Structure formats: C-alpha cells, structure tokens
Amino acid sequence: MSEDNNRELTADQAAAIAAEQLGDPELEDKLRELDPEQIRTFALALGAAMRKRRILLVGYLTALLCIVLGMAFALVMWANHEPGTFIGWVFFIPFLLAGAALWVFGKLADRIKIRVGDVEIDTKGRAVDGDDSRGGDRDDES
C-alpha cells in the first residue's frame, strides 16, 4: 500500500483524484490545465490545509471537554464547599482552560507550512521568506 502512495501521478490522474475528493466536477477541468508542478503545489497546499483543520478540530474538542468536565468539577466543588466561604471563582476555571486550549491549538495550526522547491508557503497561500524586508507578504509580479 505504501508503494501506491509514492508513485508519480499524471496531471489527469491528480486532477481526477482532487475533483473526486473535493466533490467539484468543474475543478477537474481547471486542474487539467495546470502543469504537474502546479498540481503538486496544489496537492501540498490542500494537504496542509486539511492538517490545519484537523488540528483545529482537536482544539475545539479539547476546549469542549475542558468546559464540560470543568463545569462538572466546579459544580461538585460548589456543592461540597463550606457555608459562608466564597467559591464562585471555580466557575471561571473551565473557561480559562478552554481559552488556553484554543490558543495553543491555534498557534500549532498556524505553524504548518509547505515547502515547494526553494519557496515556503503558509496555509493562507502567502510565501514565507525570512530575507524579505516586507515581512513575507509580497506579491509575485510575472
């Protein structure tokens, strides 16, 4: 099975697979117009975008788990606290944990980049260039 993943695809095969995966029949015709290097770049960018979505989904589920379990723990603590003491702060902790989880997974997702030859591309389609004095946001003029 690993041999199938490493074999080279023709432009027609790559276009058909991408159109099938994305469910857009018009995309196949548009991809057939591209050369193999452009299709390879498209496939790398699509793979990186899917990895980013998976990381964000795990972050969302982690935040949800933090809220559900944290609120259950907060309710148990509130029900068992000594009368006359303030323990309302315990209801803020699940939301702080959820916010921290969203922030961490968002930072992880932003670190995904694609390398095509000498060019590094982030998942937003911008070229990342450490030597560029304009901060990596440059427009290629052809």
Image: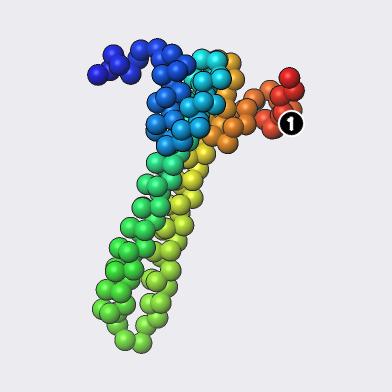
- Say which element carries label 1: loop
Residue 125 showing in the rendered view: yes
Using residue 118 as the reference point, say whether residue 58 is left or right of it: left
Decide: few, some or many residues near mark 1? Use Cα within 10 Å; few <14, some 14-19, many ≥20: few
Q: Position of residue 49 (x, y in %)?
A: 48, 35
Name the quadrant of the C terminus: top right
Q: Amino acid at mark 1?
A: Arg
| Residue drawn 40% across the image and 47% down it | 57
* Residue tagged 1: 134
Image quarter of residue 38: top right
Q: Position of residue 28 (x, y in %)?
A: 48, 27
| Residue drawn 51% across the image and 15% down it | 36
| Residue drawn 68% across the image and 23% down it | 131
Tell which of 37 and 112 is nearer to you: 37
Residue 114 showing in the rendered view: no
Q: Farthest residue in the bottom direction?
A: 84
Tell which of 27 and 38 is nearer to you: 27
Image quarter of residue 136: top right
Name the quadrant of the N terminus: top left
Q: Position of residue 12 (x, y in %)?
A: 45, 18
Q: Reply above or below: 123 against 92.
A: above
Tell which of 141 and 13 is nearer to you: 13
| Residue drawn 37% across the image and 83% down it | 85
Q: Position of residue 132 (x, y in %)?
A: 71, 25
